[in-house]
Image: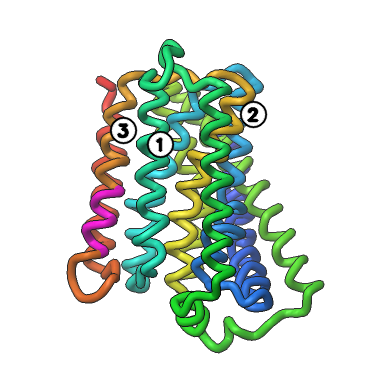
Amino acid sequence: MASLLPLFLMIIGFAALILGANWLVNGATSIGVKAKLSPLIIGLTIVAFGTSLPEMVVNIFSCIKGSPGLAIGNIIGSNTMNILLILGVSAMIFPIDVNKISIKRDIPVGFVATLAVTLMANDYFQDTSGTINWIEGLVLLLMGFGYLILTFKKESLGTTESIESLESIEPDEKQEMPWGKTIIYLVLGIIGLYIGGELVSNNAQHLALHWGMSESTVGLTVVATATSLPELITSIVAALKKNSAIAIGNVLGSNILNIFMVLGISSLITPLPFDAKMNQQLLILFAANAIMLTVVFTGKGRKISRFEGFILTLGYVGFMLFSLNPSL
């Protein structure tokens, strides 16, 4: 009986996530068309930031409440889910076209971000006794701002590929909404994602702890899965609308922001302890990035096909089974 209320609140959270994701995609697409931005840039910035809010909120609350151990596990689990499950499911719905700029800039930056947090967590730069401190957090934030500046600088050049990407939007997606309606959609979308992410993550964590799971396992699995639901739903909505540029941009941008911004801000609040056992999950995250890059270059064109999406999804199932192993 004690678990009925958390389950009920989680259902409400799922509903808020679905509505919020749909509103956010519509509002972001509209504002992007008005500003003549490519769908890729929309996904990498506006949508990715909105869908990263649950990770941000959960990490900040965990740090303030004295449970910073959840923070790194949350990000590692979320980023792994983004690549393996979210890209996998999205590709199975509609094959994903990968933009050249993603291959040249966003995928490499994702590798760099993962490498940076791995080195920091393992005291490569300074002896912090297995934590990421405020100095390293500041470095992560500066790297994040550098990435955003580079993203908008490239977009402002008005490259041919950006124009081609914009032309790839379906006709009904190119209809501009009035500014008032666009802003309402964006605000309601972010609010819906925030409330939904809070309800799902808080109550999922409550149930997991009630069932006796470790804090590390909670962060890697339950909390990470819950806080990644906005990315999953947003990418599925984009895939159903055959707007694969937003789907891939959402995943890549969210992963980069999760490490640079979310972990950066979290470590400014309190040092983030790192369990050496999570190096195994970091290796899996590196492998997930490598697999994503591999499938892009296999087959016809720069695409993630439905079959490759199925392989990615199976990889996430393996990651979950490994992370839930009691011996970890």
Q: What range of the chain is rendered magenta?
A: 289-296
Element under disc 3: helix
* Residue 60 numbered mark, or none: none
Which kind of residue does numbered mark 2 sit on?
Phe
Residue 302 position in % (x across, y down): 28, 71
Residue designated by label 3: 281
Q: What residue appears at the point 67 percent right and 47 percent down from the top-left corner?
A: 195
Q: Is residue 229 above or below residue 298?
A: above
Decide: few, some or many residues near mark 3? Use Cα within 10 Å; few <14, some 14-19, many ≥20. Answer: some
Residue designated by label 1: 76
Which kind of residue does numbered mark 3 sit on?
Gln
Relative depth, front residue between 31 and 7: 31
- Please identify the residue farthest to the right as the structure is shown: 180
Residue 304 position in % (x across, y down): 29, 67
Q: Would you say the residues marked 3 and 1 are in contact, meaning their CB atoms lie under 8 Å apart? A: yes
Residue designated by label 2: 61
Residue 293 visible (yes or no): yes
Magenta stretch: residue 89 in it?
Answer: no
Relative depth, front residue between 133 and 318: 133
Which kind of residue does numbered mark 1 sit on?
Ile
In terms of secondary structure, what is the magenta stretch mainly?
helix
Taking 30 as reference, is 143 left or right?
Answer: left
Viewer-side label of 2, 1 = 1
Q: What residue appears at the point 43 percent right and 11 percent down from the top-left corner?
A: 129
Separation of disc 3 and disc 2 at Cα? 23 Å
Separation of disc 2 and disc 1 at Cα? 18 Å
